Image: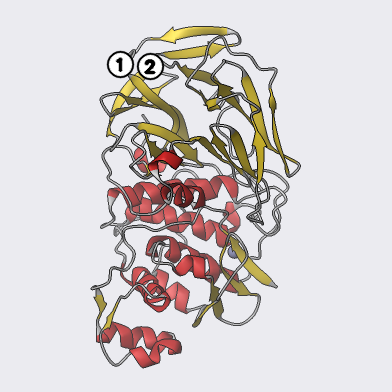
Amino acid sequence: MKILLVALGLFLGSIGSSAFAGDCVSQKEMAEIASNFSQFKKLSGKEYCYDGSQTSNLIATIMYMRKTAFAQDMKPSSDELFSGRFAQSWYNYFIGRINDLNVQSSCPKGVGAYVYGFGNTMYVCPMMLTDSFSSLDRASVFMHEARHIDGYPHITCSRGARKNLQGACDSRISDGGSYAVTVETYAQLAKYATDLHPALRAYAMASAVTYADEAFETPTRVNRQENLLLMAESRDLYLMDIGNAFRMKSQGQTPALGHIVPRAQHMILFPDDKSQTARYLFTKNAGEISQAAGDAVVEYNSKSPEERSRLVDLHIAAQWNAKIYTDRVTLACDPRSPSTSDLSFNGATPVGILYINGYTRTADINYVMTSTGTVYEFGCQNGRALLRPSSVKMDQKYKRIHKVGNTMMALTQDGYLYQINGSQASPVKTDIDGQIHEIAPRQSYQFLDGMN
Ligand SMILES: [Zn+2]
């Protein structure tokens, strides 16, 4: 049986920590690595310098597993994100199960690596080994695959973000299968790696929670709080505690004014200045990572500023996505194929997605506001692309709507915040009234952030 790692667009793009040309691995290290992986024997007589090749990225990942330093005392989390049971030497765990890395020339969409239910070979897909992919992600994937050597095949989820995707789930995180390893390795990096860039730390944390949320049939317990992130015209960011009198806490600045597109627990910034590229956004001045935030962002960044300005909004679900352009929506409804469908707005002009039911990765349908104030529905229902006028009516042409818990929050075109209750919109007073540029849902996690 072939055991796939289903990445589904989460593991795409690169991180700044990937192997930089010029960094070298000592002769002594190479001899050690070659003693565990005979395929590197011919490289073992001398120092090895990274060159961005597939072999280079394999070796960089092995080095990442060998050398990443963690805190001495790694306490388990009070939820199910981190038990510490895979926290011993990652490298020793890995070489205890895998002794051959076989690079494939092609793999199906979304597949990063796999093993069979026999032998000690891990098959690595080319997507994983591009220079635009990080050793941090690869290390997590390699540990996941190694766990399969102990057994632990996947199941098909009957519910949730990965519903009906063959072999894309484990039953529950407490079983300690391969997705538990994925969650724990990311959580361990986020919380306990001693020398990790703050943006990578935030990226690892968001990845841990995303897998915890999406790759298990039985929901994983993650202690968290839902908040609203506000971006002011001054570029200041604030986290608003909806349940605590809308109290706001400073979160540093955004590198650019723009639109925030949620992608599971990650946030992607699409700058208003269309000469700038879209990229992951991190709060608290954590900085940036060089990684492209998925296929849709790679495509966007490859276009001219003028072409970029035609993308109005982007919705990223677990199994489908929608690119809202000025005149149409392009829907990718099949998670196993790159095919897309274009549907026309027939003269209406979309201005932005309204997450009336909240941003979820599981919903089939979402809503989009048009320039006349009418609302359309778009989505993928039973695998079929859909765009139609909606019966939903809003009292004004909102720029953004998000839900925080059960509370619907709306941003007006002129920068004011409202709470919507049924057909009633009540203003929420802030210190940046009239200066609110963007809002986005944002969770904080007890394990990493503590609570607000
Ligand atoms: Zn797997």
Q: Residue at x 36, y 41 (%)?
A: 281
Separation of residues labelled 1 and 2 (CA atoms): 8 Å
In the rendered structure, find residue 415 and report the number of the disc placed on it. Answer: 2
Of the residues shown, which amino acid type is indicated by label 1?
Ile
Q: Residue at x 50, y 58 (%)?
A: 182
Residue 282 appears anywhere in the view: yes
User: Helix or strand or loop: what does disc 1 sit on?
Assistant: loop
In the rendered structure, find residue 432 and report the number of the disc placed on it. Answer: 1
Q: Nearer the viewer, residue 369 or 29?
A: 369
Side (left or right) of 5 relative to 14: right
Number of residues whose C-alpha sits closer than 10 Å to that of mark 1, classed few (under 14), some (14–19) or many (20 or more) = some
The quadrant of the image that shows the C terminus is top left
Q: Height in image: 92 above or below 342? A: below
Q: Quadrant of ligand 1?
A: bottom right
Residue 55 spot, x, y in % from top left: 41, 78
Labels 1 and 2 touching (C-beta < 8 A): yes
Residue 298 spot, x, y in % from top left: 45, 52
